[in-house]
Image (cartoon, rainbow, N blue to C red):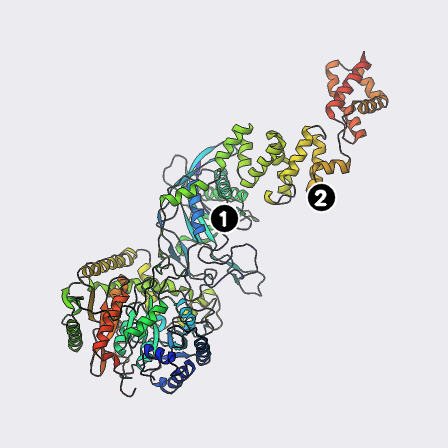
Amino acid sequence: MFDKTLAELAKGLENGEFSSVELTQSYLDRIKAEDSKYNSYITVTEEQALAQAASADALRAAGNASAFTGLPIAHKDIFCTKGVKTSCGSKMLDNFVSPYDATVVEKFNAVGAVTLGKTNMDEFAMGSSNESSFYGPARNPWNTDCVPGGSSGGSAAAVAARLAPAATGTDTGGSIRQPAALCGITGLKPTYGRVSRFGMIAFASSLDQGGPMTRTAEDAAMMLNVMAGFDKNDSTSMERDVPDYTADLDKPLAGLKIGLPKEYFSDEMNPAIAAQVQDAIREYEKLGATTKEISLPNTHLAVPAYYIIAPAEASSNLSRFDGVRYGYRCESPVDLEDLYKRSRGEGFGAEVKRRIMVGTYALSEGFYDAYYRKAQQIRRLIQQDFANALLEVDVIMGPTTPHPAFRLGEKTSDPIAMYMEDIFTISLNLAGLPGMSIPCGSTEGLPVGLQIIGDYFSEQKLLNVAHQFQLNTDWHKQAPEGI
Amino acid sequence: MEWEVVIGLEIHAQLSTTTKIFSGASTAFGAEPNTQACAVDLALPGTLPVFNENALRMAVMFGLAIDAEIGKRSVFDRKNYFYPDLPKGYQTTQLAEPIVGAGYVDIETDDGVSRRVRIHHAHLEEDAGKSLHEDFHGMSGIDLNRAGTPLVEIVSEPDMRSAKEAAAYARKIHAIVTTLGICDGNMAEGSMRCDCNVSIRPKGEEKLGTRTELKNINSFRFIEKAIEIEVERQIDLIEDGGRVVQETRLFDPDKGETRSMRSKEEANDYRYFPCPDLLPVEIDDSYIDAIRETLPELPDARRDRFIEQYGLSEYDAGVLSSYRAQADYYETVVQASKDAKLAANWVMGELARLLNQNDTDIKDSPVNADQLSGLLIRIKDDTISGKIAKQVFEVMWSEGGSADEIIEAKGLKQVTDTGAIEQIVDDVIANANAQVEQYKAAEPDKRGKMIGFFMGQVMKATQGKANPGAVNGILKKKLDALCD
């Protein structure tokens, strides 16, 4: 049962092969038995999950089930869940029980989905390895000495270890795609504005976007069908029709024009990854696609620009965590300043503090033009690079990450090396474009991810392109040893 | 040395929207603490702002009223600082691209100075909550009901040259926002708040002096007072060889002083940047034109019409048009009583006196415009004298009722029956031999003044109800007859 995709589980429920309660219970049992190895969950919501499963079964018995009714999923602990601890991977919110549901959570609840629990993540989504989590790192199911990637490392590990058939994630600089690549699963970061950010704890508001983390592109389409859409509570969500993302999955790819950015295939890249990605491209050529070398000349500026904009927004977004109304408060503050300094000093971890300081500096009087304004200008250049490229090609492909999963602790003392792991993913967030990562190979027993980039609101196309690959390859079906 | 005073004002006006600028919580004043603060106002993790279009509409109305350029594109920025009554750790405001650009208002002081005061811009922002430091078990309490209330901040150029001008400017802004109906103008409740930037310079000098910013000023009278005190302080300081330090000062009306709150060096670096949770607000001409269509008659136009249509003095017209509810009240009374001058005297006289005395807004006046009109009609048709009318009005204020009901119940109807008056006059003359003799002995041109005594006696005898014109005529006729 744990090897079934969401789509297969949906059929099983529909055909009465098992009930949602049975399905949910078996996942809960498996989490209990196995998750100590991966630390992929922060909170398991057993009681609530079983109650939701029972209502889903009742809904089905009454003939009111939809495609998603009764399917269990996990939510990244960045999404607010009513009555359930929503920690965002931080000591700061270890005591925070949200009084409301994020729009994404509400949408899954509305279609009768079951929430198994809340997955581990880098603290406030700041990290590429899941090592900044207050709850300890999640581990990569392919090799538990390795990181699962981040910040949605818990979601990626849970899906890879078959501890959830699918999970939600969020992606600010690659936080869905990079862990998906490192854990050998499928991850989709939608176009900025496609999925509501309401109730998704903000890291960098102009870059954050929620999306699905699944085993297959088909499952990602099912998830996105639930998640996507305008939300009156999020002014940056787009008022635009939501297509059926499963509708175009089977379209043939003949004539597809694939752009290969020369900047993504440099000599410095891990040769094994380069080779696997080239193999994947050849597979697409077999399916009738043509390739073309393109250039994204400002790629090298993406990481520096991102590490101005994201920390700047974060420094402001995280100001609300002040020990006054909710969250961590230090013991016996002597005055207001002491309350602020110690609550924030003790409540936030090192990486979060580093980014708050960087962001505060970048926005300071006298530095704004040199840093923040300049970074915004670079952002427009990067957008323009993609716009030019997408005039010539339908999709852009390349590696999701420059390296496979690295060892725990390997990069924690070198933040720049850690930041460079996101070099291929970050520019999409700056441009607001959608991107996917799908498994396309393996090196040293660790998965390799192929990134597929499309134009704004081309999620249907991306899912189609990914699905066709998965119909013709079996990288996405491979499971870590012992699973 | 002769000094010139330079003043600029920053006025915060709370907009009369029913819900907050970025959330659906109510903005009503006076609720139990924290009962009108929703998840967004509390800045719970994950919450996002949604801009209230009504606040936009009201800001555009204000911009049109001051003849300003309206920002077709305006942008919200975050002003970052920590304070317990600022839940997000930043205030959402507008810095570089405000909704209202440069405009102006014309002011007149009661000593006859008129001046055009330029407005630099006006922008939309959210109000903070309140910190309650008293009576809270020795701790500070936070009330977030006010957090997120929409404000329009109106920033003037340093164009005012006296405390009186500053107060006149504030009154004019008050008149505009209340006439537009975008702010209730209640300064005591903080619906309209005023910060005054004050500096002095030697007369003739171009360069501006160092300014201080005065806060905590919650009435027009205090604007005048605070500035006068501050100007005096600055002059004394400089003339004693000191210099003014740029700082924020708190006005203390009880002690009649201003005192330092924080200096420029202690000021925050607010790290402004565009709020990524809100898109730029873009509006077009048709949106602006549609709002222009809805604008009511503005105070200056109404004042000019009052002068033209009702023959009022510039002063009376200015006072009556300065507050929309008062101007509306006045016009209702004019229409019913058909006497613009009498109506003006009563609205600005007796009515204003009792409203002030009881600290009551004209909107809540216990005597409504119809009641007052009824009273004026009875003055005009000689049913009662002006003096009796004041008695009737007092009863009306405290007990209610129409003029006719009160006149009837209290028996205050004026005696106009000449037969009855003649009888009383005869009695008075018969009982005042000494005064009659004096009258007779006086030079004819002095006699007019002496009639006052007899008049008083008649009024006493009739409890003021005799028609004074009739009494005067009869007295004169009868006394003069005695002199022949």
- Specify the quadrant that holds the C terminus of chain A: bottom left
Q: What is the chain letter for disc 2?
A: B
Q: Is residue A396 above or below residue B349?
A: below
Taking the image as shown, residue B85 lies to the left or right of residue A209, namely: right
Q: Amino acid at mark 2?
A: Glu
Tell which tag, 1 or 2, sits nearer the viewer. Answer: 2
Residue A95 x, y percent position in the rendering: 45, 74
Q: Is residue B336 above or below residue A270?
A: above
| A165 vs B158, nearest the viewer | A165
Q: Residue at x 21, y 70 (%)?
A: A252
Residue A396 x, y percent position in the rendering: 20, 66
Instruction: State the residue position of label 1.
Output: B193
Residue density around tag 1, few if under 14, some if 14–19, many if 20 or more, within 10 Å: many
| A61 vs A389, nearest the viewer | A61
Residue A153 x, y percent position in the rendering: 32, 76
Residue density around tag 2, few if under 14, some if 14–19, many if 20 or more, within 10 Å: few
* Residue A465 in sight in this render: yes
Residue A463 x, y percent position in the rendering: 26, 70
Of labels 1 and 2, earlier in sequence is: 1
Q: Amino acid at mark 1?
A: Arg
Residue B283's label in the rendered image is none
Per the image, label 2 sits on a secondary structure element best described as helix
Q: Is residue B186 above or below residue A134?
A: above
Displayed quadrant of residue A155: bottom left
* Residue A423 in sight in this render: no
| B285 vs B180, nearest the viewer | B285
Instruction: State the residue position of label 2.
Output: B399
- Specify the quadrant that holds the N terminus of chain A: bottom left
Displayed quadrant of residue A250: bottom left
Q: What is the chain letter for disc 1?
A: B
